[in-house]
């Protein structure tokens, strides 16, 4: 099958930590017809600011359009497509798997092979916590499926540019808003 140019791109945004910001961003994606494959958001190291990691499926033109549209939102401090940079990317999953006394030891052995953790054990189930790249999470999920997955929750991808001279390299890529409020593109 020929490559249609549809790829997953990782976009990181530094945003104001205020009510309604996530709704505005989600509405922008909906109005423009962009698909978010994954979204993770949490507080950053800077008081009053949060970081969002989006995984967007589309071609390069779609990603450029997404970042330009995000840049127009007043609550966005900085936005960067980090897909072409070396990154550290992780996902967290909690997987509740059906167990019996006969299968419990086998499941625990699989969990340890993946450097995952059992975080809860019940009479008929256990909850496994796994952190890592998407392939690792998918592989453990696939191995646990025959036992019976009762419930699963995945956080979505979080990512940052690997360590460089500038310890906050993600913040030097993309669009920056200087103190005076006028936007300027920062080379990346």
Image (spheres, rainbow, N blue to C red):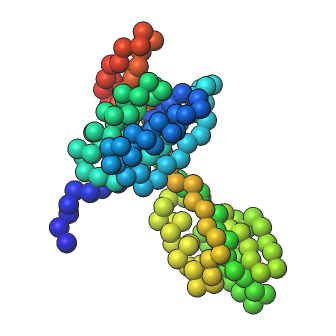
Taking the image as shown, residue 102 lies to the left or right of residue 188, namely right
Outermost residue on the bottom side: it is: 102
Decide: is 153 above or below 175. Answer: below
Outermost residue on the right side: it is: 123
Expressed as whole percent of the image width and height from the top left, the position of residue 130 reads 62, 63
Residue at 59%, 29% in the rendered image:
18
Whether residue 162 is visible: no
Instruction: Depth check: give the residue in front, 95 or 118.
Output: 95
Instruction: Depth check: give the residue in front, 36 or 155.
Output: 36
Taking the image as shown, residue 24 lies to the left or right of residue 63, namely right
Taking the image as shown, residue 41 lies to the left or right of residue 57, namely right
Decide: is 12 above or below 120. Answer: above
The total number of labels drawn is 0
Instruction: Depth check: give the residue in front, 94 or 20.
Output: 20
Expressed as whole percent of the image width and height from the top left, the position of residue 42 reads 59, 40
Outermost residue on the top side: it is: 180
Taking the image as shown, residue 62 lies to the left or right of residue 91, namely left
Expressed as whole percent of the image width and height from the top left, the position of residue 186 reads 33, 24
Whether residue 23 is visible: yes
Q: Quadrant of the N terminus?
A: bottom left
Residue at 52%, 33% in the rendered image:
21
Q: Quadrant of the C terminus?
A: top left
Expressed as whole percent of the image width and height from the top left, the position of residue 161 reads 44, 40
Residue at 52%, 77% in the rendered image:
142
């Amino acid at each position: 099958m020929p490559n249609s140019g549809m790829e997953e791109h990782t976009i990181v945004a530094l945003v104001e930590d205020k009510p309604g910001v996530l709704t505005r961003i989600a509405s922008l994606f909906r109005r423009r017809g962009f698909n978010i494959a994954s979204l993770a958001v949490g507080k950053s190291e800077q008081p009053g600011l949060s970081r969002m990691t989006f995984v967007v499926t589309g071609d390069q033109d779609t990603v450029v359009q997404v970042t330009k549209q995000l840049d127009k939102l007043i609550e966005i401090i900085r936005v960067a497509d980090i897909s072409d940079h070396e990154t550290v990317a992780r996902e967290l999953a909690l997987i509740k798997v059906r167990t019996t006394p006969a299968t419990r030891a086998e499941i625990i052995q699989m969990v340890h092979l993946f450097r995952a953790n059992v975080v809860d054990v019940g009479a008929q189930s256990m909850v496994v916590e796994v952190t890592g790249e998407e392939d690792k999470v998918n592989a453990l999920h696939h191995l646990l499926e025959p036992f019976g997955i009762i419930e699963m929750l995945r956080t979505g991808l979080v990512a940052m540019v690997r360590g460089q001279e500038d310890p906050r390299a993600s913040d030097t890529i993309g669009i920056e808003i200087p103190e005076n409020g006028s936007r300027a593109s920062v080379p990346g």
